[in-house]
Image: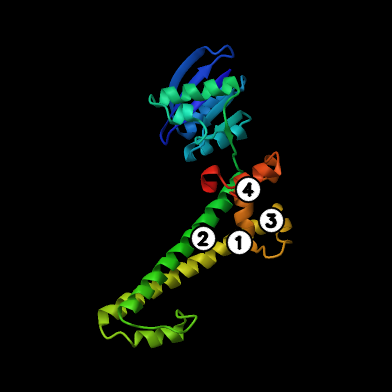
Amino acid sequence: MLIGMDVQKHMVNITEMEEDGSVKENYVIENSEDAWNTFVERYSSMKPEIALDQFTSGKYVARILRNRGFSVQLANPEKITLVFHSTKKNDREDSYKLVKLLRLGELPEAHLPSEYLDEVKSMVRYRKSLGEEVTAIKNNIHAIFSLHGIIVDSTDIFGKKRMREIDGSFKKMNEKIILDNMLKRIADLLNRKREIENRIALAVKDGKRGNLLMTLPEINMYSDAVIISEIDDISRFPAKEKFASYAGLVPRQALLC
């Protein structure tokens, strides 16, 4: 038996298909712990192959089912035009098309990283967002300086001493309050950035592959975490060309024109 699932935040549409391509049943369940326990009990003896989409809820469901011993394939939404670019798109149709592609052996599978690597990736991307927020606020401060004709020669204009000197250049209290508020936001963001960097360092230290990458020149804890969270297991790439393409190192045809 084969199963296709269209997983939404609250509901899941399920299509059962026999090996000959005939649809046995289509039904809907809640996306809840109790519902998945019932699903596992129903199919535990049959252990059907399952195809589902690769969105956040899909990853969550895939892990539940894999941990219970089911064979699960995550579909790559960018490559399944049959499902994601159809003029007739609904949950029932999508679950049918997923199981149909699975039966035909034409389902383009997406990689499902481990929970550990997903956690590292979340921390890495959060750390990146904090850095972007700091940069945006600093750019706003530079714009305020330009608006008031303040020329800054120091390389570190955000040091305490230099900021006290700059603060004296503002005549209006409102401007000083705005500047002070921005600086406090930067300090808070930098504290959160250091906190998450410490968490990333602990995660990488506890991992196995990170220690090997750290032996390479110019690779620190953060770059190490970025690499392992995005690549995962290098053996999943059948050839170095595939890896280079995944990493964006191979120019696309549009870029060469």
> Which residue was labeled with disc 3?
210
Residue 232 screen position, x and y as percent: 64, 47
Residue 240 screen position, x and y as percent: 70, 44
In front of the other: 252 or 96: 252
- Amino acid of disc 3: Gly
> Which residue was labeled with disc 4?
231
In front of the other: 152 or 196: 152
For the residues labelled 3 and 4, say whether their Cβ atoms are less than 8 Å apart. Answer: no
Q: Quadrant of the N terminus?
A: top right
Coloration of the structure image: rainbow
State the mark number for residue 222: 1
Q: Secondary structure at mark 1?
A: helix
Mark 3, other Cα within 10 Å: few <14 / some 14–19 / many ≥20:
many
Disc 2 from disc 3: Cα separation:
18 Å
Q: Secondary structure at mark 2?
A: helix
Q: Earlier in the sequence, mark 4 or mark 1?
A: 1
For the residues labelled 1 and 2, say whether their Cβ atoms are less than 8 Å apart. Answer: yes
